[in-house]
Image: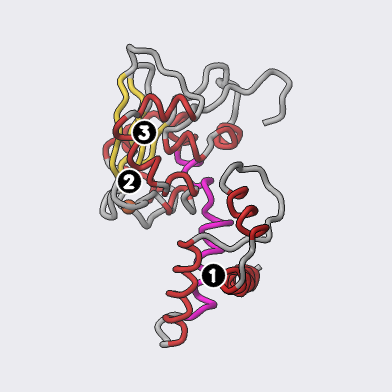
Amino acid sequence: MTTSRRDLLTGALTAAAGAALAPDPAGAQARDHEHDHDHEHDHQVAPSDPALRVKALESLMVAKGLVDPAALDALIDTYEHQVGPRRGAQVVARAWVDHAFRERLLTDATSAVAELGFGGDTLRVVENTAAIHNLIVCTLCSCYPWSMLGLPPVWYKSSAYRSRTVIDPRGVLREFGVELGDDVEVRVWDSTADLRYLVLPERPAGTQHLTEESLAALVTRDAMVGVAKVAVPRPGAHA
Ligand code: FE
């Protein structure tokens, strides 16, 4: 809900202030623990530095009357829950079933996605094939096709991903579980605020019988960033 993000950050700020004032070995241990794994359970720990900075900036802008907190919450809700990665998945599925649309998408993605009612970013779509694998990064900061994929994942914004993707893209892909043969060319695209990229993944074999809607359900955010392939659904498995 709209109040939870603000309340959580406020609570976390209070906890952080307390942690800063008092020696807290247990808290420090918990914070170390937070960085050692990625499974989900409740942590009573301070938020990250970026979260604190965002909260401080937001508080200042609200206090000065520069932004409306309700408008901020509505914006975040839109990208978290309504855009999600689903717009991108619809675009990919359409390209898989409609050859003419695919051609338009690869030639002028911004105009092609507008045909589906989507807009907001100047977009270029790059196509994965048996011979070429595309991978998206923003080496400068975290430029990302928000209008297609919603909020970027944390790893996309990490300095490790941003630097290693250009130095060792095959190594990064391997860590994401994508093994490419030596005969596959890897192309890394550096997004900017002016031009965002989206990967058109390969359509998996054995999906000829699927509807456009069912195909869209197979397409993941990671596949459209290029760190995954679209998986072939197992016989009998639910999509
Ligand atoms: Fe950026």
Q: Badge 1: few (under 14), some or many (20 or more) residues near its Cα, within 10 Å?
A: few
Query: Which segment is the magenta one?
Result: 68-91
Q: Which mark, residue 138?
A: 2
Give yes or no for contact between labels 3 and 2 (Cβ–Cβ under 8 Å): no
Q: Amino acid at mark 1?
A: Ala
Q: Does the stretch in magenta take in 146?
A: no
Residue 161: x and y, percent? 40, 40
Q: Which mark, residue 74?
A: 1
Q: Amino acid at mark 3?
A: Leu
Q: Residue furthest toward the bottom? A: 64
Residue name at image x 43 percent, y 74 percent: 57
Residue name at image x 32 percent, y 12 percent: 183
Left or right relative to 151: residue 185: left
Circle 3 residue = 135
How many angstroms separate mark 3 from mark 2 (CA)?
Answer: 10 Å
Residue 223: x and y, percent? 48, 33
Find numbered disc 1 in the image and state the secondary structure of the residue it sits on. helix
Residue name at image x 44 percent, y 37 percent: 224
Q: Which numbered disc flags the more N-terminal residue, 2 or 1?
A: 1
Q: Amino acid at mark 2?
A: Cys
Confirm whether residue 2 shows in the render.
no
Assess mark 1: CB under 8 A from ligand 1? no
Q: Which numbered disc flags the more N-terminal residue, 3 or 1?
A: 1
Q: Foreground residue, 185 or 42?
A: 42
Find numbered disc 2 in the image and state the secondary structure of the residue it sits on. loop
Q: Foreground residue, 88 or 171?
A: 171
